Image: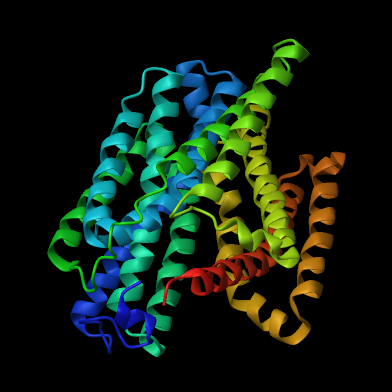
Amino acid sequence: MPADAADGAPPRHAFTAMTPEAWAVLGVLSGTIFLEGLDVSMMGVALPSMRADLGLSTGTLQWVVSAYVLGYGGFVLVGGRAADLFGRRRMFLLWLGVFIAFSGLGGLAVGGWMLIVARFVTGVSAGFLTPASLSIITTSFAAGEVRNRALLVYGGVGAGGFTLGMVAGGLLTTAGWRWVFFAPVIIAAVLWALAVRHLTERSAVVGRSRGVDVAGAATLTGGMLVIVLALVRAPEVPAAVTLATSSAGALALAAFVGVERRSRSPLIRLGILRSAPLVRADLGALLFVGAFIGFQFVLVLYLQELRGWTPLVTGLALTVAGVDMIVAPTVTPWFVRRYGNLPVALAGMLLAVAADATTVVPKTRSGAAIRAAFRLMRIRDSFPVICNSALVQGGMFTETRESSPQ
């Protein structure tokens, strides 16, 4: 990291007060995380319309969701390193441009493969944009009250994007599902123009001698893709094929571990996995986020294809998820301070049991019961994931500080 950041001093030219220019910079960065939340939630509501128009199978349709997640998860760590190496502003503008291009491609899709490619690359671009925007906040706003305020606004706007996306997705899908791809293009183009005007490189770029761990990103993403492929195709192919595909994915992940051990600039410092609390937090976050994404995918298909709900009504029903996303980060820290991480996480797990049980009871055929189940599901996800995220970020920060050259 730059020397000025390492010793606690404000980065060069950092804002020490929320001036009009500071608000302009924060507006551009917050607009990007708003766009990402909007994009993800709109896409979920539009899935049944995409399937009906393009004749997609359920297996193909889930790839529209999985492709984005895999692209994001496989490259978000590379994105952080690339922003430090090649310039935060440069990476921000480049990958926002990629987002525009491939979101537009999704709107022009004539088959499932085009949707999947578009969503994968869009996820990759988001994986580069998020760390770049966070890094720009860190280097543009002085540590303390100003930076804390900027981060609070940034997170709140992102949650607002997810909430609004539910309703916007329903409205746009009513006009045509392709608009859930074209609308983000328009918003991103405006943000790109504003970024060119307001964003500057306010801190020195880190030396490039350590490079980017491309091999680590490739083996990690490839391994996850192959394992997901094995799970999706399992009902359609012989067990031997599933076993072979799963083994190939496991080998790719094993190769990732080998690459990380030898890399001069690993994506993940494997030493942090010696922390049992961190590993438990990672596994908890994996289970909770995976359960929620799967639940939302199935619920949207159920409501629209079996219950006959319109996209707009579905979007309105699911807005409880976005409301809880805004409320939970506000109240959870208070619960954690008062009761500790473990009791709060345990409460979330008990809510998970209640929510999951509610969704399989026949009475959930009523709209009110479905909304109640979804609210429980969302609240139970919010509590533990917030706790887990804090532990993961804290562990990675500590490991990075300890391993960074002085």
Which x, y percent locates residue 141? Answer: 31, 80
Left or right position of 62 against 128: right
Which x, y percent locates residue 292? Answer: 66, 48
Which x, y percent locates residue 126? Answer: 39, 49
* 293 vs 345: above or below: above
Q: Residue at x 38, y 87 (%)?
A: 8
Tell me the quarter of the picture where residue 80 sits: bottom left
Left or right position of 116 against 394: left
| Outermost residue, left side | 197
Which x, y percent locates residue 331? Answer: 64, 78
Count of numbered marks: 0
Q: Could you tell me which quadrant the N terminus lies in?
A: bottom left
In the rendered image, is residue 265 in sight?
yes
Residue nearer the viewer, 285 or 349: 285
Residue nearer the viewer, 7 or 20: 7
Left or right position of 75 against 310: left
Q: Could you tell me which quadrant the C terminus lies in?
A: bottom left
Residue nearer the viewer, 1 or 28: 1
Q: Residue at x 59, y 44 (%)?
A: 257
